[in-house]
Amino acid sequence: MIEKMIMFAASIASRGIGNKKTDVETKQLRVVSCFGGAGIETSCPFLRTSKQGDRHFCGRCGCGDKKHTWLIKNGTEYSKLDYPVLNCPVHMPGFSNYDPNYSVPEIKERKSKIEALDPELLKTVEITIGET
């Protein structure tokens, strides 16, 4: 529990006063890690749909279905995947705690495909709802 609180505090601090966001390429890689795209046909098995509609959140990290935990939002709204420092509970590419040696059976093959992804394909990945 304390580790989760420290990780959350690091994410909040990385946002800063001016709502700093991660770079586009990192967010695109995070989107692929969570949702698929760019040739990755499946989403993360831990991805959950919000009760609020067409929003999604991570079902593995324990943050739950709240407006500030939605992974992608409309336009310029700040979403969870925008944080400069953001950890993934399964250490996927694009996240601050990415670890190529960490693997759980549910994601092993999918993670390998993302690691081998052509960077040019990432440029086609939408990073907001309704915008590219």
Image (cartoon, helix red, strand yellow):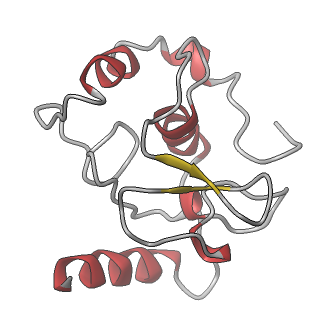
Percent of width and height locating residue 108: 24, 24
User: Given the current orientation, which residue lies at the most extreme right position?
Assistant: 130
Q: Residue at x 10, y 32 (%)?
A: 101
Q: 68 or 12: which is nearer to us? A: 68
**Position of residue 7 in the picture relative to residue 74 (left or right):** left
Look at the picture and state if 39 lies above or below 111. Answer: above
**Position of residue 111 in the picture relative to residue 44 (left or right):** left
Q: Residue at x 43, y 45 (%)?
A: 46
User: Given the current orientation, which residue lies at the most extreme left position?
Assistant: 101
**Position of residue 87 in the picture relative to residue 102 (left or right):** right
Q: 13 or 42: which is nearer to us? A: 42
Look at the picture and state if 37 lies above or below 43. Answer: above
Percent of width and height locating residue 72: 68, 54
Percent of width and height locating residue 71: 60, 56
For the N terminus, the quadrant is bottom left
For the C terminus, the quadrant is top right
Quarter where residue 73 is shown: bottom right
Look at the picture and state if 64 lies above or below 125. Answer: below
Q: Residue at x 40, y 21 (%)?
A: 114
Percent of width and height locating residue 40: 52, 17
Quarter where residue 79 is shown: bottom right
Q: Residue at x 51, y 65 (%)?
A: 83
